């Protein structure tokens, strides 16, 4: 079993990964600004209140860790549309620098369908609506992916399609061929399932799988 640091573990995909990693027998360290409010109690869970943009907090959280899952998110707000976004790239630069210096070496990074070379592959209507609302965030996710790709880490970049609050089904597809990519939906629980399976599986190292049902 591994010791896993989950950055962004207080909600969404990060919280799903936290729950499922514990259920799988891993030891989990949760780093989030509101980590102490996570409504999960387990002897193998350590909650660390800290900011992913604080290098000292990130370095402290990395001590003794085998694998990192990074799943950052932004709350919906007018700023998401109107102002430049730098959270994803700034936090990833801090994380990668620290991991390259002190370890660990394996990074599972969640971005999203539409980042990197998956941009523009969702169809005309999807692309227009999606990037009108989230274009600035995904511009920053592009930079985030570049930082990960250029690192010396053992990395994988996971790109889920539109997220739902549905249950874990296990009935999702992992697509690595760009010809297969397209619009779709997947539950946060199923994304969490995939992330946890990658803790002990190196199949997708150096790849950018798209997750969809």
Image (cartoon, rainbow, N blue to C red):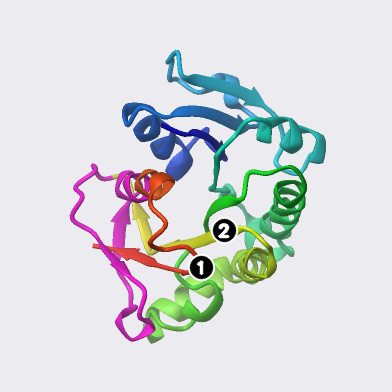
The answer to whether residue 37 is magenta is no
Q: Horizontal placement of 38 versus 33: left or right?
A: left
Vertical arrangement, residue 126 with respect to residue 47, above or below: below
Residue 181 occupies quadrant: bottom left
Residue 30, position as x, y percentages in the image: 56, 30
Vertical arrangement, residue 55 with respect to residue 159, above or below: above
Residue 60, position as x, y percentages in the image: 74, 30
Check disc 1 and report the residue beneath it.
Answer: 206
SS label for mark 1: loop
Q: Residue at x 24, y 43 (%)?
A: 168
Q: Residue at x 59, y 71 (%)?
A: 135
Q: Residue at x 61, y 50 (%)?
A: 105
Q: Are marks 2 and 1 in contact (CB under 8 Å)?
A: yes
Check disc 2 and report the residue beneath it.
Answer: 154
Vertical arrangement, residue 3 with respect to residue 199, above or below: above
Q: Which residues are magenta?
A: 166-194
The answer to whether residue 181 is magenta is yes
Look at the image and tell me in which quarter the C terminus lies: bottom left
Q: Horizontal placement of 94 versus 114: left or right?
A: right
Residue 83 visible somewhere in the drawing: yes
**Mark 1 neighbour density, 10 Å: few (under 14) some (14–19) many (20 or more):** some
């Amino acid at each position: 079993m591994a010791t896993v640091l989950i950055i962004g573990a207080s909600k969404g995909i990060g919280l799903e990964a936290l729950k499922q990693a514990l259920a799988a027998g891993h030891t989990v360290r949760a780093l989030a600004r509101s980590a102490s409010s996570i409504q999960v109690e387990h002897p193998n869970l350590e909650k660390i209140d800290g900011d992913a943009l604080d290098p000292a907090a990130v370095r402290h959280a990395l001590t003794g860790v085998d694998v990192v899952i990074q799943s950052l998110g932004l709350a919906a707000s007018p700023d998401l549309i109107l102002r430049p976004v730098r959270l994803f790239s700034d936090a990833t630069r801090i994380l990668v620098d620290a991991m390259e210096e002190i370890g660990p070496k394996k990074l599972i990074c969640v971005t999203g369908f539409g980042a990197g070379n998956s941009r523009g592959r969702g169809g005309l209507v999807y692309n227009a609506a999606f990037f009108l609302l989230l274009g600035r965030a995904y511009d920053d996710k592009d930079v985030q992916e570049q930082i990960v790709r250029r690192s010396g880490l053992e990395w994988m970049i996971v790109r889920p399609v539109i997220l739902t609050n549905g249950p874990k089904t296990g009935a999702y597809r992992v697509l690595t061929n760009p010809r297969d990519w397209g619009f779709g939906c997947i539950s946060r629980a199923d994304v969490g399932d995939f992330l946890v399976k990658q803790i002990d599986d190196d199949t997708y190292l150096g790849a950018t799988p798209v997750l969809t049902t």
